Image (cartoon, rainbow, N blue to C red):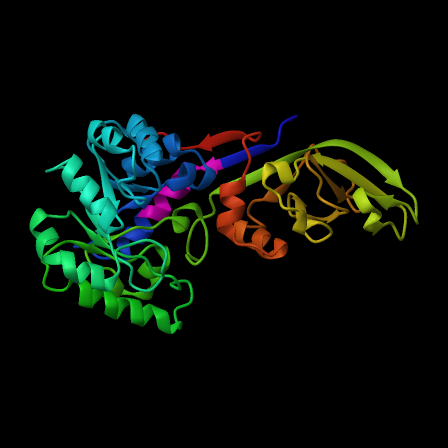
Amino acid sequence: MTTATLTIDLDAIAANWRRLDRLTGPDVQTAAVVKADAYGLGITRVARALALAGARRFFVAYAEEGAALRQALGEGPQISVLSGHMSGDTEMIHDLDLTPMLNSLEQITRHLEALPGHAFGVQLDTGMNRLGVEMLEWQAVAPILVEAGPELLMSHLACADDPDHPLNEAQLAAFLEMTEGTGLPRSLSATGGILLGPRYHFDLTRPGVGLFGGLPFEAAQPVVTLSLPVIQTREVAPGEAVGYGCTWEAETPAVIATVAAGYADGLPRTLSNIATLWDGDTPCPLVGRVSMDLITVDITHLTEVPRSLDILGPHQTVDALAEAGGTIGYEILTGLGPRYLRRYQENPA
């Protein structure tokens, strides 16, 4: 192997979707969030696997992502655009049958004037202060807008990964105040909200990171393995340093492997002298600084030089690696670079 290889288990993604679907009961639709190129794993293959698993509604961030998804899935599945109806999106929304989640009075006006009768939803701000129509604005337009027939009223929880955070209950209360009595389908929960329980489920849930093996869905099957090829090995004498800045120095004779990946491939410099790579079941410490294209690893304790070392796999999840680097699993996943050879595992039906 001469190229770093990212292996993506499509069956695990499908299994994670089905497991999250079972958590919400038969009357709740489970969608799938595949924004950011399906969290960096490839929207075409991932979305098709999710559609085969039973997903019928998908969420993306921008209309351009919706276009890529429509090309992958064809007609039929509903594609909702979280950024709403942006200026310049009208033709794409119409031609590709996308459903914008309108976020402001400006977007509401643009959509109703440009595409009367075209499907839309509304995103409400219940306390995250990021996207959505605020309480007073909603109270002013709801009597008219509800008559126009939004397909979904939705909001997003800011702290769902912390079940005890008081904002969860505050946002739930605000969402109920803004939506009760409308008779319209509602959605509040992504992965973390699903795990908060039935009061947060409403009519539709929108799991994202949990599909791809990330926290807070601890029961998720692991999805990704990242194997980095060994380019070269060298013996390092006591007192010799390795890498930029001489941040690691050998205390005893050492064998150092140089492997092909770096911060240009989404492995942050904060992993320097901290992260672990794996030769099968054997841990190998990353030594020295992560550079643009290369990482150096101490393999002194191995009996043979491996062809590759795993930095993601059964012994180290994206969240474990993220914790070592002082970030979150989302950032590791979505930052996995284009230079990786992507291999998809999927058992034939």
- The image shows a total of numbered marks equal to 0
Residue at figure coordinates x 30%, y 47% from the top left: 18
Residue 11 sits inside the magenta stretch: yes
Work out whether residue 349 or residue 219 is closer to the camera in this orientation and state it.
Answer: 219
Q: Is residue 128 above or below residue 231?
A: below
User: For this view, does 309 lie left or right of residue 159?
Assistant: right
Q: Which residues are magenta?
A: 8-17
Work out whether residue 188 or residue 110 is closer to the camera in this orientation and state it.
Answer: 110
Query: Could you tell me residue 216's position as x and y percent?
Result: 43, 59
Judged by its main secondary structure, the magenta piece is helix
Which residue is farthest left? 147
User: For this view, does 129 lie left or right of residue 173?
Assistant: right
Residue at figure coordinates x 36%, y 41% from the top left: 34
Residue at figure coordinates x 9%, y 53% from the top left: 144
Q: Which quarter shows the N terminus?
A: top right
Where residue 341 sits, quadrant-wise, is top right
User: For this view, does 310 lie left or right of residue 177?
Assistant: right
Residue 235 sits inside the magenta stretch: no
Residue at figure coordinates x 17%, y 35% from the top left: 114
Q: Is residue 248 above or below residue 265?
A: below
Query: Could you tell me residue 9's position as x and y percent?
Result: 45, 38
